[in-house]
Image (cartoon, grey):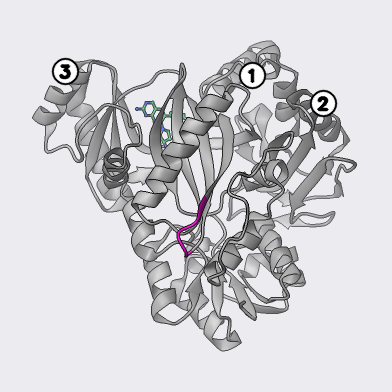
Amino acid sequence: MFKKVLIANRGEIALRIIRACKELDIATVAVYSEADADSLHVRFADEIVCIGPGPSAQSYLQIPRIISAAEVTNAEAIHPGYGFLAENADFAEVCESCNIKFIGPEPQMIRDMGNKAKAKETMKNAGVPVIPGSDGILKDKNEAKKIAHGIGYPVIIKASAGGGGRGMRIVRDADGIDRAFETAANEAQTGFGNPDLYMEKFIEHPRHIEIQILADSHGNIVPLGERECSIQRKHQKLIEESPSPIITPKIRKKMAEAAIKGAEAVNYQNAGTIEFLYEDGNFYFMEMNTRIQVEHPVTELVFGIDLIRRQIEIAAGLKFNWNKNYKMRGHAIECRINAEDPAKDFRPSPGKITSFHVPGGYGVRVDTHAYAGYVIPPFYDSLIAKLITHGKTREQALTRMSRCLEEFVIEGIATTIPFLEMILQQEDFIAGNFDTRYVEKIQAKMYAAAA
Ligand code: MV4
């Protein structure tokens, strides 16, 4: 096992990783920006290295500074968390060439899954269901029109180097192709340095459901059920749960089998997530995330597995000696509490938290780096806490969540708590009746009521 690990991240996930390291008796190195000097990950780590000013381009995204920090502190491995450099294949490669273990999959895996058209092709060849569309990259507008004519409108044009909702254009008729193709290619070139596009049939009301997997370096892969992530706004998830209220044991088994087939085909290692679009009992591969995800705690609570600990053990070369048929126990739900004002179209609300009281009790977990007196810097994402509840049933987990949202006190800044409370009260949400367009519907309803 590693003796020392550097955490190339900040916020709640940096704390979460430090905690896992402590339980494994691993010393920790935190890197931090000048804006994060008072952050808890800095206080809880054994060693700290300042890597630059607040803006992430000058700190948490500075590969040479992070590598230097690992070298001067003799860290043997780096955990990238999520965001920042977590899916940067160049970073993983530099770690490797400096003899520092990157806690995640191989650089080439990150690169291959980052190329969305290639990832889709790979999954299709492995027998994973995919959405009908182009075979790989679109050559030009004419080819785009031909393919769209073949599969039928509406279609969606996606940037191959995009992902997570960036660089997409919905096209509803043949007249729309030229413009969509041009703007999408330009945006992809500017945003990702790669103009490649691919096309799919557009699914109007999909649910976002993803399968968590763990794969060790000895060929063992375990599926850890699904997470329902359809409650999102502008591609930012607000609420996630496991299991999904609409996934039957039969579909769960099929999805898990598809995820395993895909992971096996690429010889995947470490924690990974296969994202699917789901509609009317059918599911289709969308993207694979080669990192630990924000919403990993719902899987941890339902399966009783410490995913961060497993990531570290896998990177250290440990072999799974566990039962491959992990059983799910109960239901878990996560609410993301962001420093954003839901009454002002979720505008960021950085600043000083004047009072902070976290809920507690049976079946409650709060992952946060915030405290009373903490000043939220304006440079990073607005996640300040993840509130996760577990119950025997979905109903119990939801009741517990509502109780906890009421109990949570955060003063000095605006948060998403009131919006989350409102969603938890919606009949359709309670019934499990929602898709990826649900939040825009609720937000419109909220504004109409306020007007
Ligand atoms: C789609 C789609 C409908 N049809 N692809 C958004 C994130 C990126 N990973 C892919 N996304 C979508 N791809 C086809 N063929 C709808 C979305 C989509 C979406 C997907 C999951 C969760 C929320 C979403 C919100 C808007 C659009």
Q: Nearer the viewer, residue 82 or 127?
A: 127
Quadrant of the image occupied by residue 136:
top left
Residue drawn at 77 percent across, 37 percent down: 390
The image shows residue 219 at horizontal and vertical percentages of 45, 59
Residue located beneath label 1 in the image: 432
Residue 52 can be seen, yes or no: no
Residue drawn at 82 percent across, 26 percent down: 399
Describe residue 104's horizontal placement relative to residue 324 as left or right.
left
Could you tell which of marks 2 and 3 lies nearer the N-terminus? 3
Vertical comparison of 328 with 106: above or below: above
SS category of the residue bearing label 1: loop
Residue located beneath label 3 in the image: 149
Could you tell which of marks 2 and 1 lies nearer the N-terminus? 2
Residue located beneath label 2 in the image: 399
Crowding near the residue tagged with mark 3, few <14, some 14–19, many ≥20 C-alpha atoms within 10 Å = some
Residue drawn at 49 percent across, 56 percent down: 220
Residue drawn at 30 percent across, 49 percent down: 115
Q: Is the magenta region chiefly helix, strand or loop?
A: loop
Could you tell which of marks 1 and 3 lies nearer the N-terminus? 3
SS category of the residue bearing label 2: helix
Q: CA distance from mark 2 to mark 3?
A: 48 Å
